[in-house]
Image (cartoon, grey):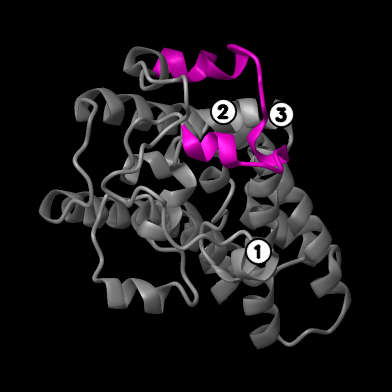
Amino acid sequence: MNFEQFIQANEPAIRLGFFLGTFVVIGLWEVLAPRRALTVSKALRWTSNLGLVVLNTVLLRLLFPIVGVGLAVFSAENDWGVLNHFDVPFWVAVPLAVIIMDFVIWLQHVMVHAVPALWRLHRVHHADLDYDVTTGARFHPLEIMLSMLIKFATIIVLGPPVIAVVIFEVMLNATAMFNHGNIRLPSALDRVLRWMLVTPDMHRVHHSVEDDETNSNFGFSLTWWDYLFGTYREQPRAGHEGMTIGIRDYTDPNEVDRLDGMLWLPFRGEIKDYAINRRNYSDAAAR
């Protein structure tokens, strides 16, 4: 068994191990050095958010029996994808593929904010009234399915090495939990990390109720795309302790932090003054 075959055979265990390890570390960190005081019952939120994780995992396994690693192997065997079609050195192909896949995720994130029908799905993630490690895994099943289809299309077009797909998956899961953590970093360390990685303070701005702050800092792992495309915002206007988390007008925990409420949320209400399409944020900023 060669290295790629070993990675393919053990991919579920590798991802689960990194997920559980990161979850425990960030969860303990939140207890020891919380950034903000939580406002909603942790038992309610954690039960609902983690219940959604379990539901999404089961649905994905049922609906998509082939995972990204398997598709990468199939693409390599059939010379699908740019990196399989050209003789790209392995040491170049791996980091290049990880960076490109991260950019696709950034574009996808912008898209689910820009298209009202997709925002209905994505607002399940933003409607969480608190912000902690479980928020990083809180997504509606329909959005998770859409994300999987985009990932599959990216793998087919790009043809990334198997190890690149595993690195990307592990990095995405780990950094999503890290940058959604209710944790405090020394300001000097936060500034240095932001040169490359999205930090909790950087991404927390994205979960503000203020429209212009919500539509900034779209990165999950790498910070480069927000710097490059002008969507970077350093700090929230009200400060991290004073800012309000969530979506304006969705403030009832029984509606947005219960599992049944989260599943129904995309089908409730209208999309008015859709945030990312606004060119004047002064009214929202003044509220």
Which is nearer the eye, 16 or 22?
22
Circle 3 Cα neighbour tier, 10 Å, few/some/many (<14 / 14–19 / ≥20) = some
Left or right of 244 in this view: 155:
right
Please, what secondary structure does the residue beneath circle 3 have?
helix
In the rendered structure, which segment of residues is drawn in magenta?
259-287
Kind of residue sitting beneath label 2: Pro
Which is nearer the eye, 169 or 267?
267
- Looking at the image, is mark 3 or mark 2 earlier in the sequence? 3
Residue drawn at x 41%, y 52% as measured from the top left: 236
Q: Give the alpha-carbon distance from disc 1 to disc 2, as whole Å.
A: 30 Å
Residue 164 x, y percent position in the rendering: 61, 69
Kind of residue sitting beneath label 3: Pro
Badge 3 is on which residue? 116
Residue 63 x, y percent position in the rendering: 64, 30
Q: Is residue 50 above or below residue 229?
A: above
For the N terminus, give its image quadrant. Answer: bottom right
Badge 1 is on which residue? 230
Residue 167 x, y percent position in the rendering: 53, 67
Q: Is residue 162 above or below residue 210?
A: below
Badge 2 is on which residue? 141
> Is 263 covered by the magenta stretch?
yes
**Can see residue 190?**
yes
Residue drawn at x 37%, y 50% as measured from the top left: 180
